[in-house]
Image: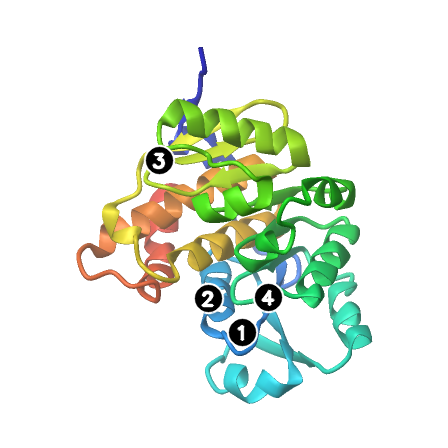
Amino acid sequence: MITYESNAPSLWQSLLPKPDATSHKYSRGYVLIYGGYPTTGAARLAAFAAARTGAGMTAIAVPEIALAIYASHLLSIMAKPYSTAAQLDALITDKRVGAFLIGPGAGVTEETQHSTIAMLRTENPVVIDADALTVFAKQATLLKTSIVAPCILTPHDGEFERMFGTSPGSQLHERIQHTLWAAAQTGAVVLLKGAQTVIASPNGRVIVNEHAPATLATAGAGDVLAGIITGLLAQGMPALEAAATGCWIHSEAARMFGIGLIAEDIPEYIPAVLAQLMA
């Protein structure tokens, strides 16, 4: 019989990061996100979510050709341009970075795979989403050998099947079994997105988020979720709890907004959710 915990604040509320009088932007966590081109919106959505979740500094590493696009739409989020692989590696190896996100709008390219591995080698927490999952299609072993620190994989069903070569199924017990298996295969926390999002750690613990409203079935919502989780990791939350907390905040923000939700709305409601949780 498969057992799991239903996601609720009681599982992680005591671990929520809280700023104090000694906090500064770097102590509150520096998030670096890999920004793709020509798909630029996904990384920006994730960045806004990370910042609203409390990261003290959020930046996007962007190809120089896309700098004008990113910079013209970002104020508090920094756009950090690069034109060579060495420049990108310098951004990744900046010792101030607390957590990375790669995948939203990244493109299924060799650069995406190289950058993912480079981020993992820093031994900082990494959230791997979207295209950065697809570049490891049927290469779970390569990914596992690169994971040396907290790492969260956030696939939807299609990305899961491309990466692991098997469908996670439609029944909850099947999805839990497949997510547990994927976590054991990779050594990462695996968050399988869906109406019931399954979060599994390599040690066998499973949390199921059943709090999400149907309105979250909208383009870009997954990018926002990845940004929330990365913001929490940068502030020091453990990987499993950061994933579960991110799911709850994401779901509750959507519930607060209600009908007509689009991805851009979710970050604006994150502070209200955090205020309730910290009250």
Is 33 situated above or below 215?
below
Q: Which residue is mark 1?
A: 77
Q: What's the distance in space between the residues labelled 4 and 1, CA to CA?
A: 8 Å
Label 2 sits on residue = 48
Check disc 1 and give the amino acid type: Ile
Q: Position of residue 91 (x, y in %)?
A: 74, 70
Question: Between disc 3 and disc 1, whose residue precedes?
Answer: 1
Q: Amino acid at mark 3?
A: Gln
- Graded by Cα atoms within 10 Å as few (under 14), some (14 to 19) or many (20 or more), the crowding at tag 4 reads many
Asked whether residue 154 appears in the rendered view, the answer is: no
Q: Quadrant of residue 267?
A: bottom left
> Which mark lies nearer to you, 3 or 4?
3
Picture coordinates of residue 246, whole percent (x, y): 45, 46
Q: Secondary structure at mark 3?
A: loop
Q: Are marks 4 and 1 in contact (CB under 8 Å)?
A: no
Q: Secondary structure at mark 4?
A: strand
Q: Secondary structure at mark 2?
A: helix
Q: Which sits earlier in the primary sequence, circle 4 or circle 1? A: 4
| Nearest the eye: 111 or 262 | 111
Label 3, on which residue? 196
| Identity, as a three-letter code, of the amino acid under mark 4 | Met
| Residue drawn at (44%, 43%) of the image | 157
Percent x, y for residue 139?
68, 45
Relative image position of residue 200 (x, y in whole percent): 53, 31
| The C terminus - image quarter | top left
Q: Are marks 3 and 4 in contact (CB under 8 Å)?
A: no
Helix, strand or loop at mark 1:
loop
Q: CA distance from mark 2 to mark 4?
A: 11 Å
Residue at image location 57% in from the left, 72% down from the top: 36
Q: Nearer the viewer, mark 3 or mark 2?
A: 3
Residue that badge 4 annotates = 57
